[in-house]
Image (cartoon, rainbow, N blue to C red):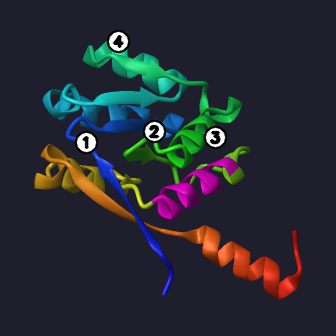
Amino acid sequence: MEKQMRVKMRFRKNIALIAHDNRKQDLVEWARFNRDILAQHNIFATGTTGHIIEKEIGLEVTKLKSGPLGGDQQVGAMIAAGDIDFLIFFWDPLEPMPHDPDVKALLRLSVVWNIPTACNRATADFMISSPLMHTEYERIILDFETRRKKFVEKFKVE
């Protein structure tokens, strides 16, 4: 069995909001409906999404780069550093994306670091309405470093 780490999420969570072009309006409507809850947390968003949320909803948003210009990777780095607790990422499954590898990497990191992740409105609704949203919470993270070391030893890879 792999070792586990526990990471405490504070009451005031760091929430990343991302939406592809065809899903931005859906995210804006969701954020408007959940404005009072979102206002109790720290909001981070990629480029245009952050500007729209700030302008139309009136929430304070820490804005990162646009997704195709590295914003998805910035959010991924923040997840790996333990600076993002919660990811709402409305992506468009029917639209080809030139930065698709970045999207997959971001979703992989959200799983590796075991952060709640919603890729559609229904999941986002369930997550934000959970009683866990209004309390501290301990995430359990598998120690993947142990697995990596075993792989290196097995294959003599460095």
Q: Are marks 3 and 4 in contact (CB under 8 Å)?
A: no
SS for tag 2?
loop
Judged by depth in the image, the label closer to the viewer, 3 or 2, is 2
For disc 2, the marked residue is 83
Q: Residues under labels 2 and 1: Cα distance? A: 11 Å
Q: How far across and how far down the image is residue 147, in percent?
A: 64, 77
SS for tag 1?
loop
Q: How far across and how far down the image is residue 5, in percent?
A: 42, 64
Q: Earlier in the sequence, mark 2 or mark 1?
A: 1
- Is 9 rendered above or below residue 145? above
Q: Earlier in the sequence, mark 3 or mark 4?
A: 4
Judged by depth in the image, the label closer to the viewer, 4 or 2, is 2
Judged by depth in the image, the label closer to the viewer, 3 or 1, is 1
For disc 4, the marked residue is 55
For disc 1, the marked residue is 10
Q: Which residues, given as a range, are shown in magenta?
A: 102-113
- Is 119 rendered above or below residue 55? below
Q: Which amino acid type is shown beneath numbered disc 1? A: Arg
Q: Are marks 3 and 2 in contact (CB under 8 Å)?
A: no
User: What's the mark number on residue 73?
Assistant: 3
Q: Are marks 2 and 1 in contact (CB under 8 Å)?
A: no
SS for tag 3?
helix
Q: Residues under labels 3 and 2: Cα distance? A: 13 Å
SS for tag 4?
helix
Judged by depth in the image, the label closer to the viewer, 3 or 4, is 3
- Is 74 rendered above or below residue 89? above
Q: Is residue 53 magenta?
A: no
Q: Are marks 3 and 1 in contact (CB under 8 Å)?
A: no
Q: Which residue is rendered at x = 42% and y = 37% of the image?
A: 16
Q: How far across and how far down the image is residue 104, in percent?
A: 62, 57
